Image (tube, grey):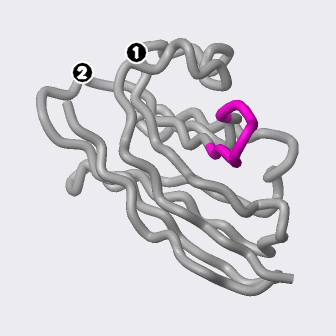
């Protein structure tokens, strides 16, 4: 299984940006996908997750109301739409695949089996 994250870039505060995570390989049906972010010297933190069916979605408090997550099963792609971006959203964003179908586990990076390479998002003030 391989994950390819893309869509990062430099934007100004208040702008929007959409990230994509394309999954290839032998995918377990209904394997959830999560987005995490990481800044230098800090641990990778959970941002959002979605069941492959799309029926369940979960967000961290820091992005709730500003970010949305969706998927296109035909393209094996998960999208993270980021609105009202803030300088503190600046980070490398990673997508990961977990076999834990219960959203209770999605915020814990230890339960993720595969990761994408990361895409840098920079929000200027």
The residue singled out by tag 1 in the image is 99
Vertical position of residue 41 compared to residue 1: above or below: below
Q: Which residues are magenta?
A: 37-44
Looking at the image, which residue is at 45% across and 51% down? 118
Horizontally, is 66 left or right of 39 in the view? right
Looking at the image, which residue is at 64% across and 19% down? 108
Vertical position of residue 27 compared to residue 2: above or below: above
Horizontally, is 103 left or right of 51 in the view? right
Q: Residues within 10 Å of mark 2 (few under 14, many from 20)?
A: few
Task: Name the one closer to the observer, 124 or 77.
Answer: 124
> Of callouts 2 and 1, which one flags the residue occurring earlier in the amino acid sequence?
2
- CA gap between label 2 and label 1 equals 8 Å
| Percent coordinates x, y for residue 87 in the rendering | 83, 70
Most distant residue in the left direction: 25
Vertical position of residue 42 compared to residue 26: above or below: below
The mark found on residue 14 in the picture is none
The mark found on residue 28 in the picture is 2
Q: Is residue 38 magenta?
A: yes
What SS does tag 2 mark?
loop
Horizontally, is 125 left or right of 110 in the view? right
The secondary structure making up most of the magenta span is: loop
Q: Is residue 122 magenta?
A: no
The C terminus: image quadrant: bottom right
| Percent coordinates x, y for residue 94 in the rendering | 50, 45
């Amino acid at each position: 299984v391989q994950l390819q994250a893309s869509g990062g870039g430099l934007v100004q505060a208040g702008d929007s940006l959409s990230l994509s995570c394309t999954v290839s390989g032998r995918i377990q049906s209904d394997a959830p996908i999560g987005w995490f972010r990481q800044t230098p010297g800090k641990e990778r933190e959970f941002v959002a997750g979605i069941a492959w069916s799309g029926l369940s979605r979960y967000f961290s408090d820091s992005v709730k109301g500003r970010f949305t997550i969706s998927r296109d099963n035909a393209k094996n792609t998960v999208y993270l739409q980021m609105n009202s971006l803030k300088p503190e959203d600046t980070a490398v964003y990673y997508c990961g695949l977990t076999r834990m179908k219960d959203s209770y586990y999605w915020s814990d990076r230890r339960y993720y089996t595969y990761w994408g390479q990361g895409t840098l998002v920079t929000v200027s003030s």
